[in-house]
Amino acid sequence: MNIKSLILTAALCLALCGCQSKGGEVNVADYLEKYSFGDDNTLAFRRAVEQARKQKAEKLVIPEGTYHFYPELAFEKYAYVTNNSAGLKRFVFDLTDMEDFTVEGNGSKFILHGFVSAFTIDSCRNVTIKEFTMDYARTFHSEGKVERVGEGWVDLRFPDDYRYAIRNGNLYFSDERGNNYPFSHLLEMNSERREPEFMASDYWLTDNTIPAEKREDGTVRIFKDKLTAKVGNVLFLGPGHRLCPAIAIDESAGVNIHDVTIRHAGGMGVVAQHSRDIELLRVYIEPEEGSERMISITADATHFTHCEGYLRMIDCHFFNQIDDATNIHGMYGVVKQILEPNRIIVFFPHDQQYGLDVLREGRTVEMLKQMSLTTYDEIEVKEVIRLNKEWYEVAFAENIAEEAAVGDLITDMSYPEVLIKGCRMGNNRARGLLLGSRKQTIIEDCYFHIPGSAIYFEGDGYYWYEQAGVRDVIIRNNTFDNCNYGYYRWGTACIAVGSGPKEDREASRYNRNILIENNKFIISDPRIMNLYSVDGCTFRNNEIIESDAYPYTLGETRRFVTEDCVNIDIQTK
Amino acid sequence: MNIKSLILTAALCLALCGCQSKGGEVNVADYLEKYSFGDDNTLAFRRAVEQARKQKAEKLVIPEGTYHFYPELAFEKYAYVTNNSAGLKRFVFDLTDMEDFTVEGNGSKFILHGFVSAFTIDSCRNVTIKEFTMDYARTFHSEGKVERVGEGWVDLRFPDDYRYAIRNGNLYFSDERGNNYPFSHLLEMNSERREPEFMASDYWLTDNTIPAEKREDGTVRIFKDKLTAKVGNVLFLGPGHRLCPAIAIDESAGVNIHDVTIRHAGGMGVVAQHSRDIELLRVYIEPEEGSERMISITADATHFTHCEGYLRMIDCHFFNQIDDATNIHGMYGVVKQILEPNRIIVFFPHDQQYGLDVLREGRTVEMLKQMSLTTYDEIEVKEVIRLNKEWYEVAFAENIAEEAAVGDLITDMSYPEVLIKGCRMGNNRARGLLLGSRKQTIIEDCYFHIPGSAIYFEGDGYYWYEQAGVRDVIIRNNTFDNCNYGYYRWGTACIAVGSGPKEDREASRYNRNILIENNKFIISDPRIMNLYSVDGCTFRNNEIIESDAYPYTLGETRRFVTEDCVNIDIQTK
């Protein structure tokens, strides 16, 4: 058999066995004409992704351009996204079960319309999404310029972007297609600094509205007891829901998000759960330069629950979002019944953490006391019966410890190694980095201008039910530029322990081994560090520069507060 | 081998082959102690049903008693229930994949608390549920007694059953556990007759509330332009959602519901889709005798979409519910794109019919014109790609007819044989029986006191998108006792064609072959029959008795109106 006939035979064999072309790339351009309807490109993109899945393509190529996406023809699934709102969601990109796959945006711009998210990355291995900017035609929040202020009222002028109506004496927002945009809290933003107004706190509303009346000059007067704001500032009116995060990652390993800009989302920016080996490189979550819009996304920039492997954020920007820059944690369930010595009923109380199925057969879990957060048992799970999205019956290989009682906490013991490097963040609502992994966590070369604590050690068993408790944290070569200028309850110092253990604080040692060195602290607010229940913290070789950028109005004047701690070494020049 | 050793050997074989006990019965009593928490019996019932499924039991025995069910530990699934609200729902009884199985209530009373439904009957064969009464601790609607009336306002007194608060100047209802009970419409009920007030119409609200203020005498004044009611009457304030139907049936064959009383549900009573051979025997949907409560359930008593085989309702009561006694129909999808001569994109427009997946591979479907409802093609479906709960891509074995155009309708061609016999119904909102099956439909020995049309031939392609168009209906030996006393838009006569074809009415012949004989019509309202686009209707041997039970205030004085019909034979003595 000569070469030619060998090739022919091989080709024939391939044809006969019905093999489709594998690998290679799929170009969205090939689907745009047939599957775009009006300006809606959603189905064209779906078809391209489906073809990529079918042929196990290595790459989806999106020619540089501006694309519009509507919910109508988007992929749909019921999704539990940690610390966002669960629901039957629509996604433009359904990356489920993809392997060794790259979505290449080539600098494209995605404009989403209405209640639809951009990406679900579910059960993937080694996927990269890169080089695009996303925004929404109508933001999930609204912004009004403060024109007049009186006792218990503020007059706001809304740009055309924020379509509204007053019904039954209350204010409602919508878009041009009739979708309702509920809102449940207000926050005053300083127009010049483009950040939360000094010491401004949230106003929480009921029933997704506020009493309002239309004024003859085209402004809207809103009414609330003790409501106030400065003329010229901007009032943010934001949703309680987090229905449309930008990029949601679940049960995946090896997820790279590179050169992606998220101008807006109705929830978090990048949010991952039960996943490992995640890298964000030059992910920018911030308003467009020169845009009137004050707020980027309506919740945390990033959020990671029960992740493992590595978690890297490098050279990212997290600005003007309505919650923390990141939060890395697990979730506590509560023991509600002890049915047998090795069998319990568990409830996960935080309603934005329903459906995550934290407890899994064959894994070792910890059991701990609710108020002190002291672990008293580590035990293997033998069986998990999911009763529904928040209740579980759990059986163990052995009997649980005798001290176990109704009200105790239980959780899985998975944590990622964390590297946050070269990132810039600030002008957002609340805190910066909420660190809760028990593996090594390095924060370096970052810039912080956070209105609350820049670095926060959270974790509690009675309010957020977030598992945390660090064991090895290095904070070095960062600049903390006038943090803590916002609402006083967003943190007790630039670096602080948050909710934490409530009882037995001296014995708890919930957070351990924190090294803070070679940083620069620029402070109008003197409170650099506030720790409790910590075992091991070294503060050395840091530069402290006093500033008068903000007034300081609180009582505490100590730079360093440590309570119920051991092995603390604070060195100041 | 003697008999004894044969038996022993057989027993040994059974033991060795690991057979569990099959068949037999499971008694809920065996689970109550271990799996009841406080007064919540939900998990005990779940465990009993699970055991019944496991051992393929013939019967679940519920000892006579009063049982309480809460959502917390209930079975959960995302459910699309036709003409109810889709959602992640909780059910007390998860009857999925059961075969030859009976739930025996023995006269028990089930009290449900909050947002939970009683039964999902899904993919079952030959199941019976019988002998129980169900109610809710807090109804999904509220009822207020009218104490004073002014221009655009009414003062209501709410019994303690209907917990409320006024916030932002608007009225909100709740229960003792903090659940919100939204409401979107009002209807005035005559307190003495316990039925909708003569000619009273719905008031539709926005944003699930109404402006209100608390009065010193403990009443609540609600405000709405043109709102009025009679002092002493009761105002119903009801939900727009239908989240918690009582009994939802899907993809099942052989479902018997016998001797079941449904006092309340937050949606429909018995609702079935894609199922066959359903029998309701002595199903009573009505308020308890002597109860102050005016309204039974908040939507249709029964509802059947795309059912087949037989559908029987015998000796049932359907009273005081907030919608029709029954509605038997299919669903129209709309052609939105013609991609290829044999490939189209279809959208199902009615949002309470999302997710039902009407078009299925291998089935023959009809295609018809939207406004005339004239069928022009019957064609086999080759492939269905579900884009999401309301959008589908559909391919056919052959090319579709050349006259097919965007905007046309498409639907499956499944219909049940219907027998409604010995049933009593009335005092509800809107209509009685909405008949849309193309198979034989017999209505006999029934009693009607319906505020709208007692028998209604609906079906349209532009509003409800409900497929109907009868072919063989017999209406005999019934009493129509003063129907049409309610809102004038609930029907143009005691027996009437409803929405129907809008264009080409003379050619359409959408409803055919209706025989009305040996009935008694007691009429304050002269309008006995109003038909259009009908081919074949015989009215004979009916007794007509004039009554002055109600005034008659409308313009139309003709007893019989037929337009654009053929083969009409009306015989009156």
Image (cartoon, coloured by chain):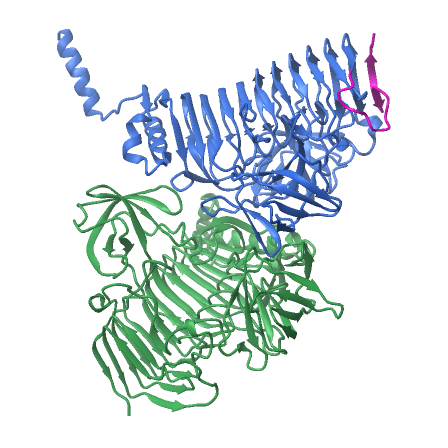
Chain colours: A blue, B green
* Relative horizontal placement of residue B506, taking residue A470 as reference (left or right): left
Coordinates of residue B414 in the picture (x, y in percent)? 29, 59
Main secondary-structure element of the magenta-colored stretch: loop
Q: Residue furthest front?
A: A217
Badge count: 0
At 20% from the left edge and 43% from the top edge, which residue is drawn?
A: B342
At 59% from the left edge and 30% from the top edge, which residue is drawn?
A: A294
Quarter of the picture holding the C terminus of chain B: bottom left
Q: Nearer the viewer, residue A356 or A202?
A: A202
* Relative horizontal placement of residue A50, taking residue B64 as reference (left or right): left
Give the quarter of the image for residue B159.
bottom right
**Residue B234 higher or lower than A433, as above or below:** below
- Residue B39 appears in the picture as rendered: yes
* Relative horizontal placement of residue B84, taking residue A5 as reference (left or right): right
Coordinates of residue B62 in the picture (x, y in percent)? 57, 63
Residue A335 is one of the magenta-drawn residues: no
Give the quarter of the image for residue B536.
bottom left
Coordinates of residue A445 in the picture (x, y in percent)? 64, 12
Q: Which residues are magenta?
A: A547-573
At 30% from the left edge and 82% from the top edge, which residue is drawn?
A: B560
* Relative horizontal placement of residue B270, taking residue A202 as reference (left or right): left
Give the quarter of the image for residue B125.
bottom left
Residue A551 is one of the magenta-drawn residues: yes
Q: Nearer the viewer, residue A383 or A103?
A: A103
Q: Nearer the viewer, residue B52 or A529?
A: A529
Coordinates of residue B142 in the picture (x, y in percent)? 61, 65
- Residue A345 appears in the picture as rendered: no
